[in-house]
Amino acid sequence: MTVASKERKLTIARAMAEAIAQEMRIDERVFVMGEDIGPLGGVFGNTRGLYDEFGAERVRDTPISETAFMGAAVGAASDGMRPIVELMFVDFFGVCFDAIYNLMAKNTYFAGGEVQVPVVLMTSTGGGYSDAGQHSQCLHATFAHLPGMKVVAPSNAYDAKGLMTAAIRDNNPVIFMFHKALQGMGWLGTEKDAIVHVPEEAYEVPIGKAAVVREGSDVTIVGITSGVHHGLKAARRLAERGVSAEVLDLRSLVPLDRESIIASVRKTGRLIVVDEDYHSYGMSGEIISSVVEQGVPLRAAPQRVAYPDIPIPFTRPMEQWALPSADKIVTAFEKMTSH
Amino acid sequence: MKPSKEQQLWMYEHMLVSRYFEESIEKIYMEGKSPAFNMANGPIPGEMHLSNGQEPCAVGVCAHLEPSDIVTSTHRPHHVAIAKGVDLDRMAAEIFGKKTGLSGGRGGHMHIFDPKVNFSCSGIIAQGMGPAVGAALSRQMQRKDGVAVAFLGEGAANQGAFHESLNLAAVWKLPVIFVIEDNAWGISVAKRASTAIERNDQRAAAYGMPGHFVPGNDPLAVYEVAGEAIARARRGEGPTLIEIETYRLAGHFMGDAEGYRPEGEKDALFARDPIPKMREHLKANEGWSDADDAALVELTRSRVDAAIAFARDSAYPEPEEALEKVFV
């Protein structure tokens, strides 16, 4: 009971807002801008309370002008500020990507390291609630593919707070992807395992470091955000059959913690990658080739459970059929072990 | 606000440096590119966009700026960089791709960054505007002096970034000035064929900010209009849009045959070359002598020659250095 009373369970949304508030209190250069992040507190709740505490100058609602305010984030960061900017849905990157991949990601390089661009770009990902093909994508690989940006994506509130703190303190651009279904907003469905104990004081979760969230010896399941939760559910299912699955939460896509992935697969000899982003040319292929390139001995061909190469369909039967799931992971494992 | 003699001479000097710099680059660019023109060959490979003729835009605006003020420029950045005080040696070395260049050869001619004087540019049309708005926001939020100036071409006025940036700057009343260098051509497409209105300064009205048009590629007229806009921004009264009629005496890039230009256009433009005009103005009104002029020309040439020599003599970076400076 005493342990329970010390528990301070937060949603990812609240953990993100808490990290931002704590950094804003100690660093005047930190400010937030984006659409509906002011009095509304963010469409996904991750700036709730900030406007009341810090006011309209440091928590500023923007016009619906992603190109302008994303470019402005680059200019403000290069001039000594530390902007946190929200792209409401990652799907909207199409209207402002030049500012992201041609400016934010490259200006440090073009300046030979003499210009810093400490922007945190936070953006929502993921589907599962019938929002169709322009509001449900993950696009992990799109951002991770292009050099010059760090990319993080938490699966739970503890990591969300620690990664946000680390991202704000980082002198490089950091893309912070949060999955809508893990956000703890009731109207999007809530993954209970994402709501975990979060210490009150500020702390960092290191960018570029994966976490073993469940230890095992027969198969390594690698995932990020929703994929981690599918992996954990599958691992519990496999445990009932006496299979010991290890689940690795990448937490960061860039830098990618290849060492932890390889160490785990060396131990288990089997690899399943779970990704809600598209199947081809993506994170799943990258992880599998990273393992194969190192010549890690494998007991079976690696498998991926990823989104089919189709625009995300609206209707519930189609969308739910296409999404990764614990069932699909179990099936993949069965395929690996059937002789 | 008329420029003093000293300010006029500053403008003239920087026009001379810029023009001779471009003429030098133009010659060296062709080394190794004949008889067959291959952009990848020679001491200066890649695309090259020269600013010959557009010097009045740069000097008329930058005459009002401090090193702490911010400038973002375009794919055609040399004249603006020179007027903003970018290190000429390191800029030349960057254009040659040398280790001593501003970024050690990572950026090249379209990606000139000199944080000591707050200069940067982007090779993508209109995309320097958002960063200028953001730098202005930074100064406003920090209660720090300084204005931001975004240079752009007339073709950029048809980009979404142009309209979004003007609106955002106006909504937040930011100390930023948008300067359109209207050289009449977006590569081969004439302004009248691409733009629904004749003059882009009229677009300022849509965003509730002052708009000014400066005809005649005249550095003194640019100086006056820019001075007013920059002073207004420094007073905290918000952004201004300026369109300057200017001329591109070179092609869009080196290798451009310029077949799109009407017969005789180039000759007419050269007849209105702003540098001889400025020289005549100084002689007629400011007691500028032939001897003064010869001495200044000599001085500016030796400065450019020294920068080019520095670039030529500098070593290339080690190839593996390409892997550095992605993150800091």
Image (cartoon, rainbow, N blue to C red):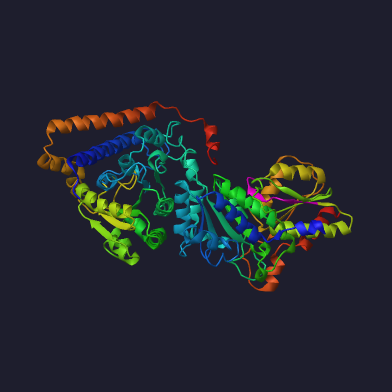
Picture mark count? 0
**Residue located 45% across and 36% down the image:** B105
- The percent coordinates of residue B322 (x first, y second) are 53, 36
Q: Is A8 situated left or right of B10 in this image?
A: right
Query: Is residue B271 part of the magenta span, yes or no?
Result: no
Image-quadrant location for residue B87: top left
Q: Residue furthest right?
A: A242
Which quadrant does the N terminus of chain A fall into? bottom right
What is the magenta segment's predominant secondary structure?
strand
**Residue drawn at point x = 53 percent, y = 38 percent:** B325
Rendered location of residue A167, percent (x, y): 59, 49
Which residues are the magenta region? A246-256
Which is more toward the observer, A92 or B230?
B230
Q: Position of residue B91 (x, y in %)?
A: 38, 36
Q: Nearer the viewer, residue A64 or B191?
A: A64
Residue toward you, A75 or B196: A75
Residue at 89% x, 58% y is A241
For this orientation, the residue located farthest to the top is B313
Tell which of A310 and A223 is nearer to you: A223
**Camera sees residue B171:** yes
- Above or below, comparing residue A186 to residue A290 in the picture: below
Q: Is residue A254 magenta?
A: yes
Position of residue B11 relative to residue A98, above or below, is: above
Say whether residue B188 is visible: no
Q: Position of residue B113 (x, y in %)?
A: 42, 41
Residue B214 falls in which quadrant of the image?
Answer: bottom left
Who's the residue at 54% across and 44% down the image? A171
